Amino acid sequence: MTKKDKIKNFDPNAPGNINNNLFGLPFNTDDAEVVIVPVPWDGTASYSGGTAHGPEAIFDASMQVDLYFEGVQDA
């Protein structure tokens, strides 16, 4: 499936697809314009850990982000 096909078939009003990538977008690293690399790192956390789970939490929460905004064409 081409990138144009993926965009055509993608519904920004639908819930994010957990089987897709960040924000539920249907792109992979080959056809994405931006690639975000999750780095779970507690190297600079003082007194207690917790930041290592940040990338996973961001991914999980990204499924709830609204990708449609009426005032921005082709957002």
Image: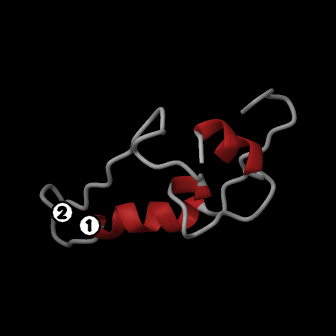
Image location (x, y in percent) of residue 1 = 60, 48
Picture disc at residue 10: none
Amino acid carrying label 2: it is: Asp
Quarter containing the C terminus: top right
Q: Measured along the vertical axis of the image, is residue 74 above or below residue 46?
A: above
Q: Residues within 10 Å of mark 2 (few under 14, many from 20)?
A: some
| Residue receiving disc 1 | 52
Secondary structure at badge 2 equals: loop
Task: Identify the colour scheme used.
Answer: secondary structure
Q: In this view, does 71 lie to the left or right of 55?
A: right
Secondary structure at badge 1 equals: helix
Image location (x, y in percent) of residue 21 = 50, 57
Q: Measured along the vertical axis of the image, is residue 74 above or below residue 10?
A: above
Q: Give the residue displayed 81% in from the left and 54% down from the top.
A: 13
Q: Give the residue displayed 25% in from the left and 61% down from the top.
A: 40
Q: Is residue 75 left or right of residue 22?
A: right
Residues at badges 1 and 2 in contact (C-beta under 8 Å)?
yes
Image location (x, y in percent) of residue 33 = 48, 32
| Residue receiving disc 2 | 42
Q: Measured along the vertical axis of the image, is residue 33 above or below residue 56?
A: above
Q: In this view, does 55 lie to the left or right of 20?
A: left
Q: Farthest residue to the left: give it.
A: 43
Q: Which of 30 and 18 is in front in this view?
A: 30
